[in-house]
Image: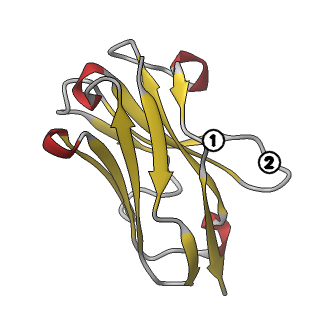
Amino acid sequence: QVQLVESGGGLVQAGGSLRLSCAASGRTVSSYSMGWFRQAPGKERESVAAIRRSGSITSYADSVKGRFWISRTIAKNTVYLQMNSLKPEDTAVYYCAAADGSYPRGERDYNYWGQGTQVTVSS
């Protein structure tokens, strides 16, 4: 079983950047497919980015393509979400999650979740 702790959230102006970190303990991140999700007030949680267990395949929500990048550093057992050109609509609580399977299709396929980190983008 893996434990996940997110960090790096905060308040940033529109157009700015943040890098979120998801530190894993208990097992290595290379044992899981990893994903970043977000939930804005009054909205359902949505997938933002994911990286397959192999580390070779990533995917992104259309709303963040070209602005966000997911990566992992196995030596640090950490997954990152680099967020550039932030917009007010990116404001949300961001969650890191791990899936036992190699090809998670959605939120239900993720087995482990962090507590979330708040990202607020001001206009």
> Number of labelled discs?
2
- Which amino acid type is shown beneath numbered disc 2? Lys
Quadrant containing the C terminus in the rendered view: bottom right
Say whether marks 1 and 2 touch (CB < 8 Å).
yes
Mark 2 Cα shell of 10 Å, populated few (<14), some (14-19), many (≥20): few
Q: Residue at x 42, y 76 (%)?
A: 17
Task: Place residue 27 in its image quadrant.
Answer: top left
Task: Place residue 76 in its image quadrant.
Answer: top left
| Residue that label 1 marks | 46
Residue 43 against residue 9 in the figure, above or below: above
Of all residues, the one furthest to the front in this rendering is 26
| Residue that label 2 marks | 43
Of all residues, the one furthest to the right in this rendering is 42
Residue 86: give x, y in percent of width and height: 51, 74
Of all residues, the one furthest to the left in this rendering is 75
Quadrant containing the N terminus in the rendered view: top left
- Which amino acid type is shown beneath numbered disc 1? Glu
Residue 6 against residue 109 in the figure, above or below: below
Question: Which residue is at the front of the view, 68 or 31?
Answer: 31
Residue 49: give x, y in percent of width and height: 43, 44
Residue 7: give x, y in percent of width and height: 47, 58
Q: Residue at x 81, y 56 (%)?
A: 41
Mark 1 Cα shell of 10 Å, populated few (<14), some (14-19), many (≥20): some
Q: Residue at x 86, y 51 (%)?
A: 42
Task: Report the side of 57 relative to 92 (left or right).
Answer: left
**Helix, strand or loop for disc 1:** strand
Task: Report the side of 10 relative to 1 (left or right).
Answer: right
Colouring used for the render: secondary structure
Q: Residue at x 20, y 32 (%)?
A: 55
